[in-house]
Each structure stands twice: as structure tokens, then as C-alpha cells.
Image: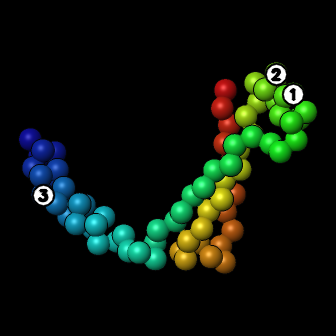
Amino acid sequence: MKQVLLLIFLFPLLISAQTESIKDSDIVNVSVKNGLEDSDLQTLFDFENINHSQFFFNGESIEGKHFVLKIKEF
């Protein structure tokens, strides 16, 4: 019962905090380029079931910052 009451009181606070924190300068645009330009290497990757994707991130909030993304799929 206490958990339900706590959730009822905290839920509006969480919703309003999320909507107020998003500004136009916080938006990050992501574009994805799939595949390779070299057709022979792309054929090898297709045979080995390897997917090559390049992600490009643009936005004022990430300028001058360094990020490392590691994605693994099994």
C-alpha cells in the first residue's frame, strides 16, 4: 500500500521533470549508413553474416565531447 501511494505522489514529479529538461539544444540527430562501398568486401561480409554500420551523431549538446559506443550482438 505504501509503495502504491509513493508511486502516485512521485509519478507527476517524474513526468514534469522529464518534459522540462528537454530543450531544442539537447536534441541529438543520429544517421546510420549501412554496408560498405567496396562490393567485394561487402560480399564477404554478407557470406560471413557480418553487418557493418556507421553511426553519425550531430547536436549542440555533444559538441566537444568524446563518446565510445560498443555494440555486441550474439
Q: Is residue 24 above or below residue 51?
A: below
- Locate residue 22, reporting x and y percent: 36, 70
Asked which secondary structure carries label 3, the reply is helix
Few, some or many residues within 10 Å of mark 1 (<14, 14–19, 20+) = few
Callout in the foreground (3, 2): 2
The dot on residue 44 is 1
Q: Is residue 38 above or below residue 11?
A: above
Q: Which residue is mark 3?
A: 9
Q: Residue at x 41, y 75 (%)?
A: 24
Q: Residue furthest right?
A: 40
Instruction: Using the numbered discs, state the Cα–Cα distance from disc 3 to disc 1 in whole angstroms.
Output: 56 Å
Which badge, 3 or 1, is on the more N-terminal residue?
Answer: 3
36 or 72: nearer the viewer = 36
Contact between labelled residues 2 and 1, with CB atoms less than 8 Å apart: yes
Instruction: Using the numbered discs, state the Cα–Cα distance from disc 3 to disc 2 in whole angstroms.
Output: 55 Å
- Inspect the image, locate mark 2, and give the three-letter code of the amino acid beneath it: Phe
- Inspect the image, locate mark 3, and give the three-letter code of the amino acid beneath it: Phe
Q: Residue at x 83, y 45 (%)?
A: 37
Q: Residue at x 60, y 55 (%)?
A: 31
Q: Splitting the image into 4 quarters, where does residue 57 fall?
A: bottom right
- Locate residue 8, reporting x and y percent: 12, 52
Q: Residue at x 69, y 57 (%)?
A: 68
- Locate residue 64, reporting x and y percent: 66, 78
The dot on residue 47 is 2
